Image (spheres, rainbow, N blue to C red):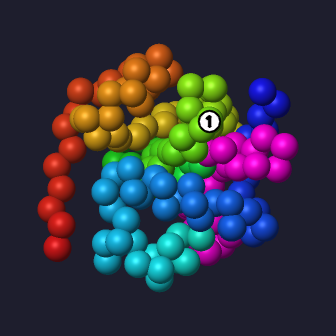
Amino acid sequence: MSLTIRAVTQQDYDQWLPLWDGYNAFYGRSGTTALAGEITRMTWARFFDAYEPVHALVADKDGQLLGLTHYLFHRSTTAIEPSCYLQDLFTAEAARGQGVASALIYAVYERAKAAGSPRVYWQTHETNLTAQRLYDKVAERSGFIVYRKIF
């Protein structure tokens, strides 16, 4: 498969949106107020705002987008360099098992290294066993458990 991992462009919106919607549906977030049109529009706009630390990459095969990843850089109290958080990763169902997700992860690794970040980290749901099989090959489990409070 001739796959290119590249930064998202404004022209990608019509193909990015179904991937974004698929990602959110996978996690049961479609139709929630958290993903109202306003948030999707703001998320998209952030990718093109030089003042935002949020970035997007897409997996492109012959002009068709097969996957996406969104990542951001942030400060930490335990390092001088920025940390890289891989926030979203999604591959179109028809393209799964073809190396798209791992190519996207490795592309984030490269962007993080170029930005001087010493680490990339992410979360997945405990029931997402398919993804965990890949993640166990490309990274190590930190052992941390995530807690949250939603208001």
Specify whether 17 is left or right of 146. Answer: right
Where in the figure is residue 31, as x and y percent of width and height? 35, 72
Circle 1 SS class: helix
Q: Is residue 18 above or below residue 43?
A: above
Q: Indicate the quadrant containing the N terminus: top left, top right, bottom left or bottom right.
A: top right
Residue at left 63%, top 26%? 98
Left or right of 137 in this view: 104: right
**Disc count in the image?**
1
Whether residue 17 is situated above or below residue 141 in the rendered picture:
below
Q: Which residues are magenta?
A: 45-67
In the image, 109 versus 23, the foreground residue is 23
Measuring 60% from the left and 49% from the top, which residue is drawn there? 68
Image quadrant assignment for residue 8? bottom right
- Neighbour tally class for label 1: few under 14, some 14-19, many 20 plus, Cα within 10 Å: few
Q: Is residue 115 visible?
A: no
- Which residue appears at 18% of the width and 56% of the height? 148
- Mark 1 — residue? 95
For the point 54% across and 40% down, the residue is 93
